[in-house]
Each structure stands twice: as structure tokens, then as C-alpha cells.
């Protein structure tokens, strides 16, 4: 269990810096492209969830 705790702390320490460091090494165009890709992925998930909710409502109402 000691190793697991140590590795967890190590990951949290580096993880907190990772995004900021990566962003500082990118050009503005690269940051923009990364943000657009993330936004598209998020929108895709929201759309899928909305379709699932709509389908579930339709299925419940049809009984």
C-alpha cells in the first residue's frame, strides 16, 4: 500500500503541472486546434446523451 500511495502522490504532483506546461510549449494555432478538438468531442457527447434522453422519453410515452 505504501508504493501505491507514493505513486498516487507523484502522479498528482506532475498532473497538476502537465496541462499548463504543455500549453506553454504550444503555439497559439496549436492551442486553438486542441481547444476546437476538445469542444467538438464534448459536443458529440452532449448530442449523444440528448438523443438517448429523447429516445427514452419517447419509449416511456408510447406505453
Image: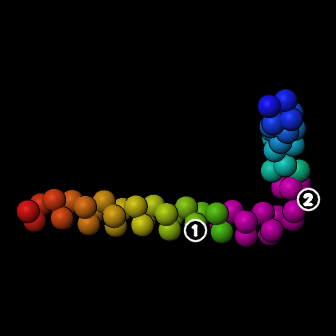
Identify the residue under disc 1. 40
Q: Outermost residue, right direction?
A: 25
- Residue at image position (87%, 43%) is 14
Res. 15 in view? yes
Q: Which residue appears at 65% of the width and 67% of the height?
A: 36
Which residue occupies the foreground of this view, 38 or 4?
A: 4
* Residue 25 numbered tag: 2
Give the left or right position of residue 42, taking residue 36 as reference: left
Name the residue nearer the viewer: 45 or 34: 45
Q: Is residue 28 above or below residue 10?
A: below
Q: Which residues are magenta?
A: 22-36
**Image quarter (top left, top right, bottom left or bottom right) of the N terminus:** top right
- Taking the spot 73% from the left edge, 66% from the top edge, the residue there is 34
Quadrant of the rendered structure where residue 53 is? bottom left
Residue 13: x and y in percent read 86, 37
Q: Residue 58 shows which numbered tag?
A: none
Counting from the top left corner in percent of width and height, residue 45 is at 49, 63
- What whole-number distance in Å separates the C-alpha atoms at marks 1 and 2? 23 Å
Magenta-drawn stretch, dominant element (helix, strand or loop): helix
Q: Is residue 61 left or right of residue 28?
A: left
Q: Could you tell me which residue is drawn at 60 percent across and 63 percent down?
A: 39
Q: Secondary structure at mark 2?
A: loop
**Residue 56 in which image quadrant:** bottom left
Q: Are marks 1 and 2 in contact (CB under 8 Å)?
A: no
Number of dots carrying numbers: 2
In this picture, is 24 found above or below 40? above
Considering depth in this image, is 24 or 4 the residue closer to the camera?
Answer: 4
Q: Which comes sooner in the sequence, label 1 or label 2?
A: 2
The magenta stretch spans residue 23: yes
Amino acid at each position: 500500500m505504501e508504493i501505491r500511495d507514493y505513486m498516487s502522490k507523484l502522479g498528482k504532483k506532475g498532473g497538476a503541472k502537465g496541462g499548463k506546461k504543455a500549453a506553454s510549449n504550444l503555439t497559439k494555432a496549436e492551442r486553438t486546434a486542441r481547444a476546437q478538438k476538445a469542444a467538438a468531442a464534448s459536443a458529440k457527447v452532449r448530442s449523444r446523451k440528448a438523443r438517448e434522453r429523447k429516445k427514452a422519453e419517447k419509449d416511456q410515452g408510447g406505453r
